[in-house]
Image (cartoon, grey):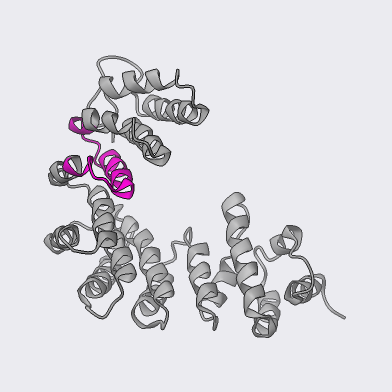
Amino acid sequence: MLLPIEEIITDLADSDRPLLNSSLADLSNIIPEELSFLEEVWPTIKPERRRQIVSRLVELAEDNFELDFDSTFKKCLSDQDAEVRSKAIEGLWENEEPSLINTLIALMEQDNSKLVQAAAATGLGKFTMLVEQQKLRPAYTSKIYQALLAALNDRSKPIEVKRRALEAIAPLDSPEVEKAIGEAYRSSSPRLRVSSIYAMGKNGNPSWLSILLNEAGSPDSEIRYEVARACGELGEEEAVPCIIELAADPDVEVQLTVIEALGQIGGTEAKNFLEQCLDEPNETVQQAAEQALRELLVEGEDSSPFKTGAL
């Protein structure tokens, strides 16, 4: 006789049955015996169904932080299907266990899918942020740094993998990282240039500001979006007038990123502009401005004179 969880897994494996969120939620925090049964059944499930299951698990975990599917995601890292492996990496974004580092490095270096390699590089970016916060031992730091740098310097790696490796390594403070960002910016690849702008913000070095302000007039909306975002990351008040000009951008995503960036940067000029945005007819813009002003209050920007560089 099947246990309740075994019945649920058997039903999930049946492609003719609808995928119910209530059944998928039962895979949260499954015990080793239940995981063993899932492991046994998993290879018999059709690839498309496995993709659907993992994608829905990722969505459920994003919507409800109490759900924990990490055990399932870890098992899916060795799935035969590249999309399943890639989604499993995405699902493990909140997992900060150092034991994942070697697995992600191996996937980035050796997986036969560039989709998985790129996802693994992005996954390592979570750990570079932990390095920045001094939450990882030096041995792990060196391993991550060397692996990402090697991926960037590997000419055989696809552009998408190089992009994600650059974005992941950006927070690490070293001349090699700054050199890699600069080389990507001067690259002939439009996609790599977009990632270089993103990386400038994550790198946190104010020396990138002049490039960012120059790129604010780019005809590429993706570049303008990343410029606004990167300026918010740098937190330099010098960028505020230029960023405010981007608030009239025809791309609404750029507009909203500008508002978020102004909330990060702070200062009198930014606060005054955000207050003006509260009168905008666009409700989405109004809500974004309200959120940005709340961020300023959290940062102690609720009285004059306003401090510079809120972050």
User: Which quadrant is home to the N terminus?
Assistant: bottom right
Residue located 77% across and 66% down the image: 18
- Residue 101 point in image, percent of width and height: 38, 71
Q: Can I make out residue 126 in this image?
A: yes
Residue located 27% across and 19% down the image: 268
Side of 240 relative to 250 (left or right) = left
Residue located 31% across and 52% down the image: 133
- Residue 289 point in image, percent of width and height: 43, 27
Circle count: 0
- Residue 167 point in image, percent of width and height: 30, 59
| Figure check: 67 above or below 124 | above
- Residue 126 point in image, percent of width and height: 38, 59
Instruction: Using the rendered view, name the quadrant where residue 151 is placed.
Output: bottom left
Between residue 282 and residue 67, name the one nearer to us. 282
Between residue 117 and residue 173, name the one nearer to us. 117
User: Which quadrant is home to the C terminus?
Assistant: top left
Q: Residue furthest top?
A: 304
Side of 91 relative to 49 (left or right) = left
Residue located 28% across and 14% down the image: 304
Instruction: Using the rendered view, name the quadrant where residue 305 is placed.
Output: top left
Magenta region includes residue 235: yes
Between residue 114 and residue 133, name the one nearer to us. 114
Magenta region includes residue 288: no
Between residue 96 and residue 195, name the one nearer to us. 195
* Overall secondary structure of the magenta section: helix
Side of 72 relative to 4 (left or right) = left
Q: Can I make out residue 171 in this image?
A: no
Instruction: Using the rendered view, name the quadrant where residue 5 is placed.
Output: bottom right
Look at the image and give the residue range highlighted in magenta: 214-239
